[in-house]
Image (cartoon, rainbow, N blue to C red):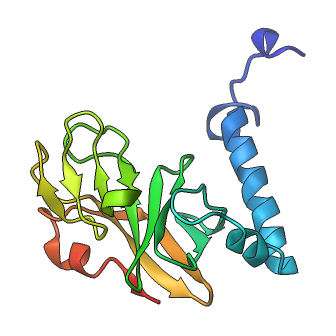
Amino acid sequence: MPMSDHDCQGCALSGEATRSRREFLREAAGAAAAALVTLGVLPAVARALPLGLAEPVGARTAAGEKGYAIPAADGVSIDKDEEIIIARWQGTVYAFALSCPHQNTALRWMEGDHRFQCPKHKSKYRPDGTFIEGRATRSMDRFAVRKAGNSVMVNLDALFREDDDRAEWDKAFVKV
């Protein structure tokens, strides 16, 4: 029966049971990535990514958590679906919110300058997310992370603002 002719009151297709195409594809991609990790193929794929800006392959392992291969060298990658920046800099891995704290514009990694910059109002940030200059009034937001084998696990439900929870923001990284 076409959805337009279907009364969804009380059936499995109503409310939270329905998924968008994007959610379905994201879940399918996560399942495929998890299978690749299990088969030992994912680490080889992750090593083949170019240094600098790349799109990481991540797999959800639990509700609210997603794992990414630890970058082999300094550089930045972006998970556009989750709006996360994974950055490795001088033996430390961070997970940042993709958006600038000033007006939510997607940040860019300036490889030659080894810093992040907002293309809209030119706010600048160090590789650890610390605010340098511009219209923003605080550093980049960091996700809580933990190391699990050769992966960094990002807690998608724990995003810390430097000005709201400095203690948690300060420890939101892993050493590699």
Between residue 98 and residue 122, name the one nearer to us.
122
132 displayed left or right of 64: left
Compared with residue 30, is residue 148 higher up or lower down, i.e. above or below? Answer: below
Compared with residue 100, is residue 2 higher up or lower down, i.e. above or below? Answer: above
The residue depicted at 44 percent of the width and 58 percent of the height is 85
Q: Where in the figure is residue 98, as x and y percent of width and height?
A: 39, 50
The residue depicted at 25 percent of the width and 58 percent of the height is 140
Q: Where in the figure is residue 53, as x and y percent of width and height?
A: 52, 56
Number of marks in the rendered image: 0
Taking the view exactly as shown, the residue that stands out farthest to the top is: 5
The residue depicted at 15 percent of the width and 73 percent of the height is 166
Q: Where in the figure is residue 4, as x and y percent of width and height?
A: 76, 10
Between residue 159 and residue 91, name the one nearer to us.
91
Residue 134 visible within the image: yes
Quadrant for residue 33, please give it: bottom right
Quadrant for residue 112, please give it: bottom left
The quadrant of the rendering that contains the N terminus is top right
Between residue 18 and residue 14, name the one nearer to us.
18
50 displayed left or right of 42: left
Compared with residue 42, is residue 164 higher up or lower down, i.e. above or below? Answer: above
Taking the view exactly as shown, the residue that stands out farthest to the front is: 112
Residue 19 visible within the image: no
The residue depicted at 72 percent of the width and 69 percent of the height is 48
156 displayed left or right of 71: left
Between residue 18 and residue 124, name the one nearer to us.
124
Q: Where in the figure is residue 121, as x and y percent of width and height?
A: 19, 36
